[in-house]
Amino acid sequence: MRTGVRPDGRQLAPVMPWHAYGNMTDQDAQALASYIKAMKPMKNKVPPLSGPTEKAPGPYMTVVVPQ
Ligand code: HEM
């Protein structure tokens, strides 16, 4: 959420605004996590991640990052 790095080491695309969320305080992050964890669970099968050369299993968008 604040570093843009997934547990598996992959960096999140900048459309996920982690650059902005990186300034969040520990207290804000804890409050956000508490709020989300207080939500009632729902069933939603999430499609697996796919690489740039793989066919996406569901709707997707392409992000082009200028070099
Ligand atoms: C409280 C607000 C938000 C929370 C808690 C949140 C949390 C997360 C988390 C945990 C991930 C990583 C998921 C994973 O490991 O697969 C993620 C990815 C992502 N988020 Fe957010 N997010 C928030 C807001 C947003 C907003 C405002 C946008 C865009 C308008 C956004 C767009 C995305 C996208 C596109 C990804 C996937 C990036 C990638 O796979 O490279 N998120 N978000």
Image: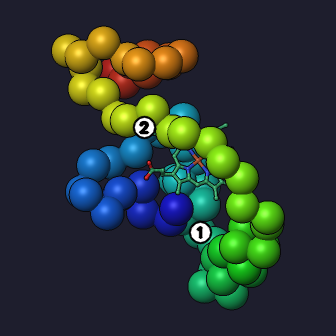
Label 1 packing within 10 angstroms: few (<14), some (14-19), many (20+)? few
Q: Is residue 34 left or right of residue 15?
A: right
Quadrant assignment for the C terminus? top left
Task: Name the residue at 25% across, 26% down.
Answer: 51
Secondary element type, mark 2: loop
Comparing labels 2 and 1, the label whose residue is closer to the camera: 2
Depth check, front residue: 66 or 38: 38
Relative image position of residue 15 (x, y in whole percent): 54, 35
Relative image position of residue 45 (x, y in whole percent): 54, 39
Snapshot quadrant of residue 20: bottom right
Does the numbered disc 2 mark a residue whose Cβ is under 8 Å from ligand 1? yes
The reply to whether residue 9 is visible in this rendering is yes
Mark 2, residue position: 13
Mark 1, residue position: 23
Q: Which mark is residue 45?
A: none
Q: Is residue 61 left or right of residue 8?
A: right
Does the numbered disc 1 mark a residue whose Cβ is under 8 Å from ligand 1? no
Q: Amino acid at mark 2?
A: Ala
Secondary element type, mark 1: loop
Q: Amino acid at mark 1?
A: Asn
Relative image position of residue 55 (x, y in whole percent): 30, 12
Label 2 packing within 10 angstroms: few (<14), some (14-19), many (20+)? some
- Evaluate if marks 2 and 1 touch, with contact meaning CB atoms under 8 Å apart: no
Task: Name the residue at 32% across, 48% down.
Answer: 11
Q: CA distance from mark 2 to mark 1?
A: 18 Å
Q: Choose the circle earlier in sequence order: 2 or 1.
A: 2
Farthest-out residue, bottom: 27
Q: Is residue 20 above or below residue 29?
A: above
Task: Name the residue at 66% across, 48% down.
Answer: 43
